[in-house]
């Protein structure tokens, strides 16, 4: 049986964590290491100066481990210290809210944990669920029966995609996969293979008195581009986006080299 390390950025008490753990437990040997509290928007940050430790928590009769660190810390320590052997896959999620477009992908702790796994040579998949704004603003909405079924469906979708890659490697050049799931999706929903849309979300911090407070950006009146993660979600489809960590393509390198030396004096 393959071993999976399961983590997230919303913490062990997140509505998206336990349904996914239950689904993965049916098919895999699942080890866990998740943040002990929500650590969203921290990307792939690593705790350089803080001393970290994890504790055992009983969650619905299932023992899990929670770390006082970032999602990437969880991936790093989970891979090398919690798992008895290197895991076959790292799964991160289910995130409360989407991680689409360059801005959110590069800011996401959920995706950041998957990136950390990939840097350590482990295949990784992150999963995020699109939620209505009221669910994000009022966390009580996340614990209503209908919402639990939504997360259950998202967990089944995620587990099936993970199962697809149980015994096959990612294609060359693919380091990780990020999944974004519409709110009402189920196993019969259409899947699109997408690329991230290029978003510029502008102002993130708003002044309140003498302090600046983070607020999620709103994407109003955005023109969606077919083939992107945003376009898939806006059409009610599941978005599966393969990513690589090569931060410059040959085409951009060649173009930059030509431009640079043409103007170098």
Image: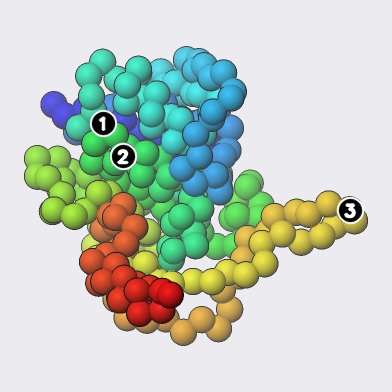
The residue furthest right is 209
* Residue 98 visible from this viewpoint: no
Residue depicted at 23% across the width and 24% down the height: 86
Alpha-carbon distance for marks 2 and 3?
40 Å
x and y percentages locating residue 98 in the rendered image? 46, 58
Colouring convention used in this rendered image of the protein? rainbow
Name the residue that disc number 2 marks. 119
* For marks 3 and 1 on the same chain, the one whose residue lies earlier in the sequence: 1
Name the residue that disc number 3 marks. 210
SS class, disc 2: helix
x and y percentages locating residue 64 in the rendered image? 42, 21
Discs 1/2, front: 2
Quick one: 105 or 150, which is closer to the camera? 105
x and y percentages locating residue 157 in the rendered image? 28, 52
Q: Label 1: few (<14), some or many (≥20) within 10 Å?
A: many
Name the image quarter holding residue 238.
bottom left
Name the residue that disc number 1 marks. 4
Discs 2/3, front: 2
Which quadrant holds the N terminus? Answer: top left
Residue depicted at 43% across the width and 45% down the height: 112
x and y percentages locating residue 123 in the rendered image? 23, 41
Residue 186 is left or right of residue 113, and the answer is: left
Residue 107 is left or right of residue 244, and the answer is: right
């Amino acid at each position: 049986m393959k071993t999976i390390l399961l983590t997230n950025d919303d913490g062990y008490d997140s509505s998206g964590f336990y349904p996914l753990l239950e689904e993965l437990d049916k098919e895999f040997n699942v080890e866990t290491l998740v943040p002990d509290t929500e650590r969203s928007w921290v990307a792939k940050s690593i705790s350089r100066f803080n001393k970290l430790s994890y504790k055992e928590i009983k969650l619905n009769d299932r023992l899990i481990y929670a770390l006082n660190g970032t999602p990437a810390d969880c991936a790093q320590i989970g891979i090398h210290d919690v798992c008895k052997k290197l895991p076959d896959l790292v799964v991160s999620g289910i995130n409360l809210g989407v991680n689409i477009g360059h801005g959110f992908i590069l800011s996401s702790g959920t995706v950041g944990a998957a990136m950390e796994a990939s840097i350590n040579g482990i295949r990784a998949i992150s999963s995020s669920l699109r939620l209505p704004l009221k669910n994000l603003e009022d966390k009580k909405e996340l614990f209503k029966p209908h919402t639990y079924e939504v997360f259950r469906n998202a967990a089944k979708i995620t587990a099936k995609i993970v199962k697809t890659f149980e015994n096959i490697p990612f294609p060359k050049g693919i380091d990780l996969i990020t999944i974004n799931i519409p709110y009402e999706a189920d196993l019969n929903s259409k899947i699109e293979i997408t690329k991230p849309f290029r978003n510029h979300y502008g102002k993130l911090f708003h002044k309140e008195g003498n302090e600046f407070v983070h607020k999620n950006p709103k994407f109003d009146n955005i023109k969606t581009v077919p083939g992107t993660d945003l376009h898939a979600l806006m059409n009610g489809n599941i978005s599966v986006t393969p990513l690589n960590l090569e931060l410059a393509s040959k085409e951009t390198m060649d173009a930059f080299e030509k431009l640079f030396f043409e103007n170098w004096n």
